Amino acid sequence: MEKSVQKNRVNWIMGALLLSMFLSSLDQTIVTTALPTIVEKLGGLDLISWVFTIYMLASTAVMPIVGKLSDMYGRKRFYLTGLLLFLGGSALCGAASTMEQLIIFRGIQGIGAGFLMPITFTLIFGLMPQDKAGRFQALFMSVFALSSVIGPTLGSFITTHLNWRWNFYINLPLGIVSFIILSMALFEQKNEEKKHIDYLGSILLVVSTISILLALKMGGVDYGWLSWQILGLFTIGVISIISFFVTEMKVKEPILPLGLFKNRVIASSSLVTFIQGVVMFGSLLYIPIFVQGGLGGNVSDAGNAVTPMMFSVMIGASISSFTMTKLSWRINMLASMLITGVGLFFMTNMPLDANKWIVRLDMVVIGAGIGILMPIAQTAVTVSAAERYQGIATSTVTFFRAIGGVFGTAIMAALVNRHMETAIQSGAPKLGVPAEKLEMFTNPQVLLRAGGQIPEQVLTMLKNALGDSIHLGFWFLVGAAVIGFLSACFAGSSRFDPVAYKKKQAAKQQTVEMPN
């Protein structure tokens, strides 16, 4: 009877965690299709990009800090705090009356999401039998992928048939259910050990993360790469991160223990995860542009090209939940990077007249490779870290993936835009058009919006230039995948052994109460 009660409790907790993860992931995409309506109602068109940027900055910056604090003070209090921040931010976003208010409230939402993501995976390993932990990792990764697929469609439906504010209010009833379940069902033992919080390290980590991410997001878009604003942000970021490393080597309880990266599995997994972020977000950004701009598809075609990729991410994650106990971390990571790299290579040679189904098939290949790595990296880092560092170790996986995504899209955008500029300067005079008149089309998004207003010959030249530019961008992603492949070689021959890990955990005092 007692075992049955404990099993039911764990099932309720897993359901609540899945729901919370789904909501926080969904909020990154559900607003996309509602933005035109939001701008129409609130104004602030020039601030529209900050609705996404602030959410990303806030969630990424707090992840490592929350991961470390949850190691010190327990998972439950920080998870529930994050859930309250997320729900409070959602309520405020729904009630916003100006674009400035919406951006501030999205920041609160982002902070809450930054609490939820890293702690979720640590809780899975603390609560689930170790032979099932990998499967649940894959399940949670699948929820992340699924939210990316249905978010825009759900946002469009809500905005059309209800009100744009319900894109935020929808979080409240579901989130409250999750909060109540976790408050009642999740237990943890108190740790009376004296704590030493690394305040200076925390501040430096936040400053360096936000400065560098802002520079990468705004460089080449809002300001030139060599402008004083971007160079200033990079300078602040570099000085802060150097100061951070110096601080972490001196303090008694560092917010990010650098000794973690002496472990070859953790170091290799972190670098490969960074590369995963580069290729995943680069592909998600430029495949739709290639379909809509280069192949002449519409917005629906562009969205449909990405959907197979996210579904295959779920398939890849499910496959690796089984292979992690059969094959070493190194073999799994190598397979992930190899499959992803092959898919990216096909994109470097994709002709403009290719059938859209060929593009979608290639997306399946890329998505499967990315999906294989998701539970592998999360599990490898978690089981390789000492128990007292599991929260911070787990948070670094999500942190490095997010940083890689911003870095990859920034570099790829710079390459694509620069190549477009060069192609226009050489192609426009041949058509008798001054290159200065076509400068605006160095930004692919401008070309997509103005396609019907451009003479046919000029449009053909611009499409060819865009296709070649995106091909170059995917060569960059292929190079990143090669670096990821080489990095995976250093992961070693160890693999996930649920029996050995269970014995290891049984010998230590648990922060989260474990089911029998």
Image (cartoon, grey):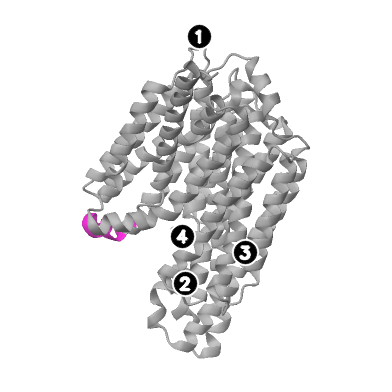
SS type, badge 1 = loop
Q: Nearer the viewer, residue 54 or 221?
A: 54
Residue 195 visible in the snapshot: yes
Residue 22: give its label: none
Q: Residue at x 67, y 34 (%)?
A: 266
Select label 3 or label 2 by which is in front: 2
Task: Tell me: 93 left or right of 183.
Answer: left
**Magenta stretch: includes residue 112:** no
SS type, badge 3 = helix
Q: Residue at x 34, y 43 (%)?
A: 106
Q: Who comes first in sequence, dot 4 or dot 3?
A: 4
Label 1 vs label 3: CA separation? 52 Å
Residue 221: give its label: 4
Q: Which segment is the magenta one?
A: 36-48
Q: Which residue is mark 3?
A: 474
Give amino acid for label 1. Glu
Task: Tell me: 121 left or right of 376.
Answer: left
